[in-house]
Image: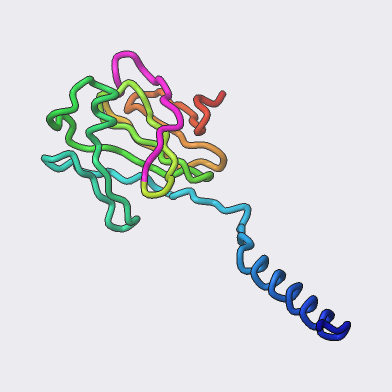
Amino acid sequence: MITKSKFRIFGNLFVGLALLFTGACATLTITDVDFSEPMESVLEVSSNGMVQDVEKGLKFNILPIQQEETGEGNRVTIEEIRIIRGQKGHYFIIAPGFKNVYVFSANNGELVLDNTIKIDENGVANPAFNQRDTYIQLIDGTSRAFNLTHEGLRN
């Protein structure tokens, strides 16, 4: 027979366990994180399409981006890429001769394309990224500069 005191003990035990498990499942979120990198990385492309930034712990195959940009995905046709990470964590990627900047976000071991930003129909010969306060600046080796966010060109 369950007495009133045993019922109270079991009730308190149940509530305590529920609070313990609920607290263990809570998600810790850190806000206002600035992911920006002060300088771009210039990465050489290997013969099998791999690029690696040892200092930043990033390694991936560039061939899917090359396929999207040039239509050639079976063999490597680019020698280097330029990559920089923006304030909100997006990766901006371009290579000499590319018409577009590709914007990716990291998600469970993948780079997911968020945006393709058209820069120049003829391609950018000498691209370089600069980190600015709230945007990424792309210069093209001439006098042109483009202000970029993950959403596109910024005026």
Q: Quadrant of residue 93?
A: top left
Q: Quadrant of residue 99?
A: top left
Q: Nearer the viewer, residue 38 or 108?
A: 108
Q: Nearer the viewer, residue 143 or 59?
A: 59
Q: Nearer the viewer, residue 21 or 81?
A: 21
Please say which color scheme the image uses. rainbow
Residue beneath the point at 28% across and 29% down: 126
User: Considering the image in quadrants, where does the N terminus appear?
Assistant: bottom right
In the rendered image, residue 123, in percent from the top left (x then y), is placed at 29, 19
Instruction: State yes or no: residue 63 in magenta.
Output: no
In the rendered image, residue 78, in percent from the top left (x then y), is placed at 18, 31
Residue beneath the point at 27% across and 45% down: 60
Q: Quadrant of residue 65?
A: top left
Q: Decide: is 128 above or below 17.
A: above
Q: Decide: is 68 above or below 104.
A: above
The range drawn in magenta is 110-124
What residue occupies the far top of the structure in this picture? 121
Q: Total of numbered circles in the picture?
A: 0
User: Considering the image in quadrants, where does the C terminus appear?
Assistant: top right
Secondary structure mostly seen in the magenta stretch: strand
Q: Decide: is 29 above or below 88.
A: below
Q: State left or right for residue 76 relative to residue 7.
A: left
Instruction: State yes or no: residue 113 in magenta.
Output: yes
